[in-house]
Image (spheres, rainbow, N blue to C red):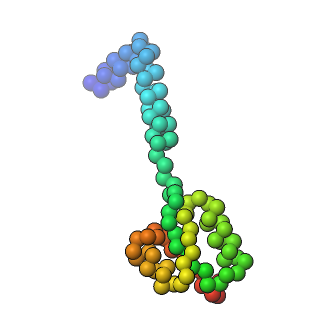
Amino acid sequence: MIRTIIKKELLQLRRDSRLLALIVVMPVLLVILFGLALKLEPNNVKMAYYDEDKSYFSMMIDTKLWFEGYFELYKVKDLHTLKEEIRSGRAKAGLHIGSDF
């Protein structure tokens, strides 16, 4: 029974080349369109930043995060403010670089 259906479908595919093109082209086209429409990278995530160390390396981290483009980085004055920014939802992420970094 199944073999008969498979034979019939294969014969029909050989006769109608448009159907074969539709079977091959449509899924490829849909994958390309959905791939272009779906963007999974985060963009402009607000991040509070508190740097106790203020060394060359901590400033490099600050600069690197700023230029990545994923984060909207802003400095806060102390650790308490950093935690409050995250708790209140004004910042989606926080970074604390300790004095012994």
The quadrant of the rendering that contains the N terminus is top left
- Residue for point 65% across, 71% down: 61
Residue at the limit of the structure toward the top, as seen here: 15
Name the spot of residue 43 as percent of width and height, x first: 52, 57
* Relative to 32, residue 70 above or below: below
Q: Quadrant of residue 84?
A: bottom left
* Relative to 28, residue 42 above or below: below
Residue at the limit of the structure toward the left, as seen here: 1
- Residue for point 46% across, 68% down: 92
Q: Is residue 96 left or right of residue 30?
A: right
Name the spot of residue 47 as percent of width and height, x first: 52, 69
Name the spot of residue 15 as percent of width and height, x first: 41, 12
Name the spot of residue 49 as percent of width and height, x first: 56, 75
- Residue for point 42% across, 26% down: 23
Residue at the limit of the structure toward the right, as seen here: 56
The quadrant of the rendering that contains the C terminus is bottom right
- Residue for point 56% across, 71% down: 74
Using the image as rendered, state which of residue 54 and residue 100 is in the foreground. Answer: 54
Using the image as rendered, state which of residue 48 and residue 100 is in the foreground. Answer: 48
Q: Is residue 96 visible?
A: no
Q: Is residue 61 visible?
A: yes
